[in-house]
Image (cartoon, rainbow, N blue to C red):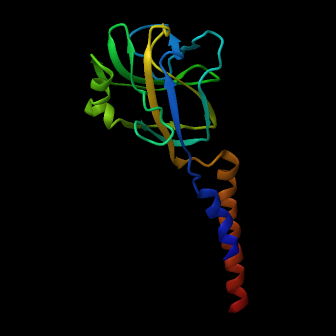
Amino acid sequence: MKALLLPLALLAASAQATVVNIDATQYGFDFPTDPAPEIGQIISPITNPPGEPLLQLTLEPGTYVIRNATGMAGADPSFIGWNFSSGWVWSVVVSDAATNQVVYYADRGGIQGTQALIAGQPDVKSFQDTFVLTQATTLNFMIRDYYLPDNAGGVAVDVSLISSVPDAPASALLPLGLAAIGLRLRGRGRVRA
């Protein structure tokens, strides 16, 4: 029975959940094109003031759920939407820190007149989606804007691992481990006979 524990341990997913508070006055990106960024597009993350560290999170390979974190422990209660010159919006942009390629983008609720109106939009309140990482990746989190000093508010998102992807060495060892268990059980059968 002990031999079965190793392969099963390789399949077990470790739980990861992190609330990321994205301050709209500090984290955005330069627009190479407008309108919205597309998955795979190269962008240039920026900070306010320039040169400050980016808002980053390193995640293992797997499938992640990203959702509005309003009301969750660790979420900044004022980050329920952000304001720019035309009104209040809710958006989040995630890029690969190594390549600057967009990994994820969401924009919900349209443009509203107040922070409370944007936060109250059904598609903002219930926002939840998924993205997949095929390898361990450091991600940049930002809002969709290039001029940060006139912004207010921000967005809080919860990023949770829902299904891990075994790394290549573990994946390669799993069939070998199962074969070894099979041979061992087969060998035991012969002794008993």
Viewer-proximal residue among 112 and 126:
112
- Image spot of residue 74 (x, y percent): 51, 39
Residue 147, horizontal then vertical, whole percent: 48, 7
Q: Quadrant of the N terminus?
A: bottom right
In the image, taking residue 169 as reference, residue 158 lies left or right, namely left
* Residue 115: quadrant of the picture: top left
Label tally: 0
Residue at position x 32%, y 8% in the image: 86
Position of residue 15 measured from the top left corner of the image (x, y, whole percent): 56, 51
- Depth order, front residue of 135/112: 112
Q: Residue at x 50, y 39 (%)?
A: 159
Along the horizontal axis of the image, is 167 left or right of 91? right
Q: Residue furthest front?
A: 77
Rendered location of residue 90, percent (x, y): 37, 23
Q: Is residue 30 above or below residue 39?
A: above
Where the C terminus falls, by quadrant? bottom right
Q: At 56% from the left edge and 46% from the top edge, which residue is drawn?
A: 16
Relative side of 14 to 6, left or right: left
Q: Which residue is depicted at the point 59% across and 52% down?
A: 14
As drawn, the residue found furthest toward the bottom would be: 193
